[in-house]
Image (tube, rainbow, N blue to C red):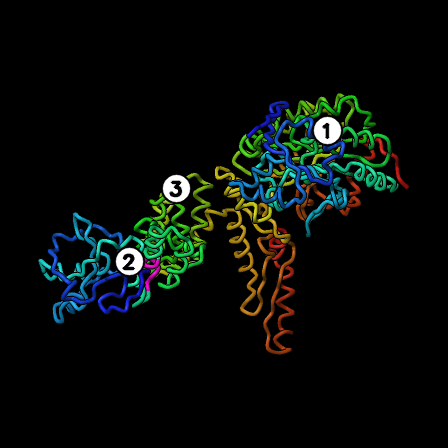
Amino acid sequence: MGSKSSDKQDVHRGIPLDPAIAVQKVMLSKVDLADSTFRITTCTDLNKLVLSIQNLGLLHPPLLEYNSLKYVIVCGFRRIAACMKLGWKKVPVTILKENFDRFELAQLAIADNALQRSLNLLETSRAVKLLTDTCADQKQFKQTSRDLGLPSNPSATAKAVKICQLPLKIQDGILADTINMSMALELGRLDPEVAECLVEFFGQLKVGLNKQRELLLLLNEISKREDISIRHLIAEKKLQNILQNAELDRAVKRQKIRSYLRQRRFPAISRAEKKYEKLVKQLKLGNNINLMPPKDFEGMTYLMTLRFDNRQELNNMKEKFEKIIHHPSFGKILER
Amino acid sequence: MVIIFLIIKKLFVILTKLYIDQQIADHPTTRSIQDRLNVPTEIVSRPQQVYEALSSAADPVQQGKEILYLTRNRGAFFKKCPGTSHYTCCDYQILHIGTFCHMDCTYCVLQTYFHPPLLQYFVNHEDLMSELDMVLSQKKILRIGTGEFTDSLIWELWTDVSNQLVQRFGAQGHAVLELKTKTTAIEGLQNLVHNRKTIAAWSLNTHHIINTQERATASLSARLKAAARCESWGYPLAFHFDPLVIYDGCEEDYKQVIQDLFLNVTADNVVWISLGTLRFPPALKTMIQNRFPESKIIYEEFITGPDGKMRYFKPLRIKLYRKIIACIRELAPAVLVYLCMEDDEVWQEALGFKPFEVGGLPHMLDVSAVKHCHLEPVR
């Protein structure tokens, strides 16, 4: 960034600090509110800020750039919005000199946010994207990222930069903490409509990353297997009946949906599991004996575990063993 | 870039570059291959130079099919079939003539088996032949094949390796060579003195699977016609239904293939038929998703077997095997049918016996080889 001058007027390449010189009042109608090039913040709640400005005044004037047509906001998007909400026609601002290049403006915008609070994932992404777009020199980019507390290694940067370009619903999902970066990027590879549908689906179920991954895998593979889109699959009556059932709490819904999707993805395996459970139930093993089938019914070895506290309890199991061994259901389990 | 298309029976081989290991640049086999291929050539001192050319490609696996690297085999030419734990293996010996394949089957395990996968051919045949002489000096029944790490006959386009091998096997009496292929590159086999010690073998599948999953391979009818020609030249035959792929209507389709098979070849001349359902290491799933996004074969009901490979849920495998075996039994009751990489339970359910009850799978195959290939009994 620019040179540091001993002149108290200049801190960064001549940004005027003396309000008497630099701060001027600008008509809000002259500010290009649609230009979000330098917007880092994702916070849309203005209530506290409006109250503060109303009671104490605008403590820090926003930084604006004049581009011969309109004023573009570099720092202070929320302050400008709050002033508008208060019905101000004019707002005190600092106008940046024209010789600032885009990279320098980007740094000002990022520093105004990143150096006074923690950025959330989307804000970090916007900041990284802004730096990427304005700085071609990799070495300079890396150093500036570090200085501004942003990720600087290429892999993290590459991921971060994608986040703010994802469909808005995915970004909303990140802000609502419904999905994390890893899932957001996975969803970003899907058709945007499907991704939006999944964000909503995960939001309704409030599931963590591992469960989201499992559900996404099941949905994706059913969709491939049956040649139907994930959107149609989620919109199907069976799934919607579970999702919309007001009598079920979220944990039950999650369990029912997972179970339904698994049965649909693996019908033969699910049937075998159900049949096994039914036969084991008929054995009436009780709480102290557990019979585990071979994993996925592939091998031949069953595992039986016994729980007992003393010799007498173990002895009592002998009779039960005899019954199990000769039980027709046990034969069926082994015959498969 | 110069691209050469070699067309043999509708098989397209696109080689864009030939790399030659500096150490064998003057080898007669290298020269002979170079003469037959009119593609840009680069002499390299280290294999890494070839690997780098591969890794920089957008699809390194595809690139590995378009580059041929001639080198010498620094290790053993003979290897035991890798098999896998917990399942019955045929105990076949691999003669390692080269790696990878220019055909492009979605399910091909070689895509993830070699790092990186690359068409690589070993030109030091003098070492191969002396190792083969040593192996053949063992007076025991041996089943040897070249079709494990590559397709046996793709090299016919540029080399005469099959010619050498068939004649060498034809000159002894206790070992058989199996040439396993999905091509129809059999012209070089005609007029060779094979003495029935070479088995010409084809990997077979349904029209649907060949059309959708076996890119650049010969059609089913072309494979069967090639098999019939080999039979007419006196070669014993073998067929491998591997991988059997489950899809809607697959049972009827496989029945049709079996009917077509025995319309083309004589059952008595078939040494063995192997059956093996689709199985793959988990890494191959990602490879198929990336390279063949249209392929659906990985979305059936797979489980992870004790060997870590994905395979169909056991009852599904058994059901398909039973149908296919019943069909083979109907048309060719005496042909030896065996299962590739299955456990005793599947053998029992599908074939009605376990391999150890009849002396083990290797013994079953040896007996059939002795009978069909007129091997000398070994004491």
- Residue type at the position of mark 3: Ser
Say which of B179 and B45 sits in front.
B45
Residue to which mark 3 is pinned: A229
Which residues lie in the magenta part? A119-124
Q: Which one is closest to the eye, mark 3 or mark 2?
A: 2
How packed mark 1 is, by other alpha carbons closer than 10 Å (few <14, some 14-19, many 20 or more), is few
Say which of A324 and B75 sits in front.
B75
Residue to which mark 1 is pinned: B32
Please tell me in which quadrant of the rendered image residue B13 appears: top right
Q: Chain of mark 3?
A: A
Instruction: From the image, give the main secondary structure of the stretch colored magenta.
Output: helix
Q: Chain of mark 2?
A: A
Residue to which mark 2 is pinned: A40
Residue A198 picture location, percent across and down: 36, 50
Residue B29 picture location, percent across and down: 74, 32
Residue B361 is one of the magenta-drawn residues:
no
| Labels 3 and 1 positioned on one and the same chain | no
- Residue type at the position of mark 2: Ile
Mark 3–mark 1 distance (CA, rounded to whole Å): 54 Å
How packed mark 2 is, by other alpha carbons closer than 10 Å (few <14, some 14-19, many 20 or more), is many
Q: Chain of mark 1?
A: B
Residue A122 is one of the magenta-drawn residues:
yes
> In the shown orientation, is residue B170 left or right of residue A267?
right
Q: Secondary structure at mark 3?
A: loop
- Residue type at the position of mark 1: Ser
How packed mark 3 is, by other alpha carbons closer than 10 Å (few <14, some 14-19, many 20 or more), is some
Q: In the rendered image of this protein, does residue B278 appear above or below residue B212?
A: below
Q: Residue furthest right?
A: B379
Q: Which one is closest to the eye, mark 2 or mark 1?
A: 1
Q: Residue at x 36, y 43 (%)?
A: A232
